[in-house]
Image: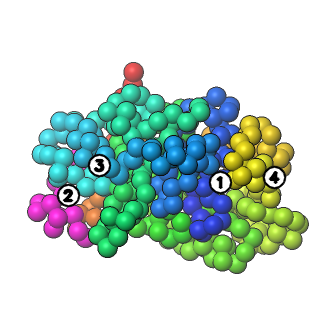
């Protein structure tokens, strides 16, 4: 399953995504985690030191390698330079599994405990006035377009905050999107904005409350979010300890919070994947980007990259 975490900046999105990743990994499930937030904190939240996190290789810096590898011998794509972040796979493209060994994973991902982690990269000084952050996130989008995850494989992405997630088609690449919502009007407002944008694309959006301190907070979230609210995370000494640099086993998280993580995993595990819609939406956003800017940049009609009869399927990479 592919899972995204979104929410207002400061809502605890990275913290909750790291707790979910740790919870699933502790159960022995294979987890591929990707930090696609403009503030790259997922590695540290999962237990890396600041020095390790700063030295982590990045997807954004390896875009030429990613393009060249995924292009394979697809006859519709004459060169890696012709690819953009939304280029969909077709016959001849290289499809990848989340836990295989290949040049992309060798260059961009590292193990962190039981988790395989990749990061899109920091928005640094050289980018100021030159590029938007989505030029880095585009590497993750291209990878997800070609990634075939199988049964009991979890791909978890910590996304950019708020409506920034809609600056590309990346928001359609997930089976479940968890929106982390504080018990405040501003945070609820971000949920409603996200829900409005996502509604026409069939995004499976679920709210999870965070930083809940008392019954009034629960009542507020329940009243504001109704059936969209799956559960909530209470103020946590476990999380505070981690933020001070003391990492504890996930099993020591408060029982109320462990129950919420269990409910999240149950929801993920019972959500079906629609490969046809996945491919269809990937093609739709590729054509949008081609018309908006891609054709002009490439000097050719990028609609020709679309293989109309191709659909991603696990059987294509079986074995």
* Mark earlier in primary sequence (3, 2): 3
For label 3, the crowd category at 10 Å Cα-Cα, with few meaning under 14, some 14 to 19 and many 20 or more, is many
Q: Is residue 230 left or right of residue 319?
A: right
Q: Depth-wise, is mark 3 or mark 4 nearer the camera?
A: 4
Q: Which mark is residue 63?
A: 3
Q: Is residue 239 above or below residue 21?
A: below
Q: Which residue is mark 4?
A: 237
How many dots with numbers? 4
Front residue (pair 259, 81): 81
Cα distance in 3D space between marks 3 and 2 = 21 Å
Provide the major secondary structure of the magenta segment: helix
* Secondary element at image label 1: helix
113 above or below 17?
A: above
| Mark earlier in primary sequence (2, 4) | 4
Query: Is residue 301 covered in magenta?
Result: yes
Disc 1 from disc 2: Cα separation:
39 Å
Region in magenta? 292-307
Q: Tell me if residue 289 comes above or below residue 238 in the rendering.
A: below
Observer-side mark, 1 or 2, equals: 1
Name the quadrant containing residue 246. Answer: top right
Name the residue beneath numbered marker 1. Answer: 15
Pointer 2 residue? 303
Marks 2 & 4, CB-CB < 8 Å contact: no
Alpha carbons under labels 2 and 4: distance apart: 52 Å
Name the secondary structure under disc 4: helix
């Amino acid at each position: 399953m592919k899972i995204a975490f979104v929410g207002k900046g400061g809502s605890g999105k990275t913290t909750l995504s790291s707790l979910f990743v740790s919870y699933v990994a502790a159960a022995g499930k294979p987890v591929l985690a990707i930090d696609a937030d403009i503030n790259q904190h997922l590695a540290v939240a999962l237990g890396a030191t600041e020095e390790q996190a700063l030295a982590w290789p990045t997807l954004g810096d390896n875009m030429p390698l990613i393009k060249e590898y995924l292009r394979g011998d697809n006859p519709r794509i004459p060169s890696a330079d012709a690819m953009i972040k939304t280029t969909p796979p077709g016959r001849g493209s290289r499809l990848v599994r989340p836990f295989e060994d290949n040049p992309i994973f060798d260059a961009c991902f590292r193990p962190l405990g039981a988790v395989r982690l990749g990061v899109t990269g920091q928005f640094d000084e050289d980018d100021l006035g030159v590029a938007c952050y989505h030029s880095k996130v585009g590497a993750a989008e291209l990878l997800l377009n070609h990634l075939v995850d199988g049964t009991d494989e979890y791909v978890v992405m910590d996304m950019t905050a708020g409506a920034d997630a809609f600056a590309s088609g990346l928001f359609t690449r997930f089976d479940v999107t968890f929106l982390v919502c504080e018990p405040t009007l501003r945070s609820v407002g971000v949920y409603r904005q996200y829900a409005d944008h996502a509604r026409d694309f069939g995004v499976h959006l679920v709210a999870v409350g965070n930083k809940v301190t008392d019954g009034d907070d629960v009542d507020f979230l329940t009243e504001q979010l109704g059936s969209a609210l799956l559960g909530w995370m209470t103020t946590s000494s476990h999380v505070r300890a981690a933020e001070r640099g003391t990492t504890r086993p996930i099993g020591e998280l408060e029982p109320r919070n462990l129950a919420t993580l269990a409910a999240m995993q149950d929801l993920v595990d019972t959500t079906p994947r629609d490969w046809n819609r996945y491919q269809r939406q990937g093609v739709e956003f590729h054509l949008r980007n081609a018309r908006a800017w891609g054709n002009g940049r490439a000097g050719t009609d990028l609609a020709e990259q679309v293989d109309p009869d191709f659909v991603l399927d696990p059987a294509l990479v079986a074995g």
